[in-house]
Image (cartoon, rainbow, N blue to C red):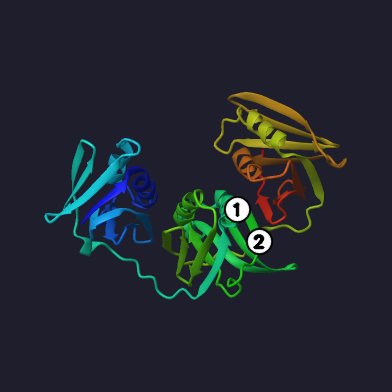
Amino acid sequence: MKVTIERNSLLKTLGHVQSVVERRNTIPILSNVMIEADGDMVSMTATDLDIAIVERVGATVHTGGAITVPAHTLFDIVRKLPDGSEVELTAEENDRLIVKAGRSRFTLACLDKEDFPVMSQGDMPHRFELASAELKRLIDKARFAISTEETRYYLNGIYLHVANTEDGARLRAVATDGHRLAQVEQDVPEGAAGMPGVIVPRKTVGEVRKLIDEFDGNIQVSLSDTKIRFAYDGAVITSKLIDGTFPDYSRVIPKGNDKVLEMDCRLFAEATDRVSTISSDKTRSVKLALGEDTLTLSVNSPDSGTATEELAASYGSDTFEIGFNSRYLLDILAQVEGETVQVYLADPSAPTVLRDMVDEGALYVLMPMRV
């Protein structure tokens, strides 16, 4: 195999595929990316056995062929080459890859391409298309609530499913870690109506999100009960799904919270961030005291001192106090697009609902805490 490829194109593609590769691997071949040259294209494949990414990039192919090469090493080399340079990749018979650019020359030890694992695709009967902006919205507004607790592995991803609502069927993305919940929905795309509810793993969500940042168009989504595939712009990500049952999240979304607070979201977030500076405990708790058209935020720390800040708000005359984890509250407020956030409260120990007045398809639930 011998190919010549422009450095920036190679760097962009390598950057996408090498992020799938784990830094520490007990199986050496999983540290490698497979490079295949054919026609006027080079395709690069990386996998960790749970997720696989294949991306194609245009190149001058002098001789076709395939080889596997250490992914992070090759990426670091290309990253440090001069901008705009031409990179020549030549595979030698003794499992070595020669990388040349200008006066630089590197020789990398490779592994046999026959040992590179191929993720079986299987039949994916459910197929639909989503605009990149729609998928970006579903991911961004839900993924902050994905649990990192490995014991409850079924919460380690986004639950993507079609939900039947009063307004008809909706494509819905839900994530929760038991302390907060994010639910984002939109119209059901054509072809998604009969899809099973699937849990897309956190790592897959992150990899897909990175790729669609640079893409503006439609993404083809294919899925079965065990795998999901995202295809767009010369790149394909195939991933196993989390094999578990997502809990009945609708039971924790309160319907009768009758105390409504409306206020400027940015001012609310900035004030929460300021007063939580004093908090010394892990939870960084903050107390909200509501009175007629006022909200007072306060933190009382035995070690650091106290902090209070009063804000103007739209609220009734019932006095009310409730405590929250400030970091969780800030995570939710960061998702609100509109200037105003609506907070629906019931009592100091009941779940609180937050809504974005601009994006009606987004809903957030936050569990209170004792302060």
Q: Nearer the viewer, residue 294 or 12?
A: 12
- Residue lying at 63% horizontally and 38% vertically, measured from the top left: 326
Q: Quadrant of the N terminus?
A: bottom left
Callout 1 environment at 10 Å: few (<14), some (14 to 19), or many (20+)?
A: some
- Residue lying at 81% horizontally and 48% vertically, measured from the top left: 259
- Residue lying at 30% horizontally and 48% vertically, measured from the top left: 5
Q: Is residue 333 left or right of residue 264?
A: left
Helix, strand or loop under label 1: helix
**Residue 302, position in %: x, y?**
61, 27
Where is residue 314, by image quadrant? top right
Give the alpha-carbon distance from disc 1 to disc 2, as whole Å. Answer: 10 Å
- Residue lying at 34% horizontally and 52% vertically, measured from the top left: 21
Q: Nearer the viewer, residue 193 or 263?
A: 193
Q: Are marks 1 and 2 in contact (CB under 8 Å)?
A: yes
Q: Which mark is residue 186?
A: 2
Q: To which residue does mark 1 refer?
A: 137
**Residue 270, position in %: x, y?**
67, 32
Q: Is residue 45 left or right of residue 349?
A: left
In the image, residue 352 sits, relative to residue 81, either above or below, namely: below
Q: Is residue 241 left or right of residue 300?
A: left
Q: Which callout, 1 or 2, points at the residue further toward the start of the chain?
A: 1
Q: Nearer the viewer, residue 34 or 38?
A: 38
Which kind of residue does numbered mark 2 sit on? Gln
Callout 2 environment at 10 Å: few (<14), some (14 to 19), or many (20+)?
A: some
Which kind of residue does numbered mark 1 sit on? Arg
Q: Which mark is residue 28?
A: none
**Residue 68, position in %: x, y?**
24, 55
For the question of whether residue 9 can be seen, the reply is yes
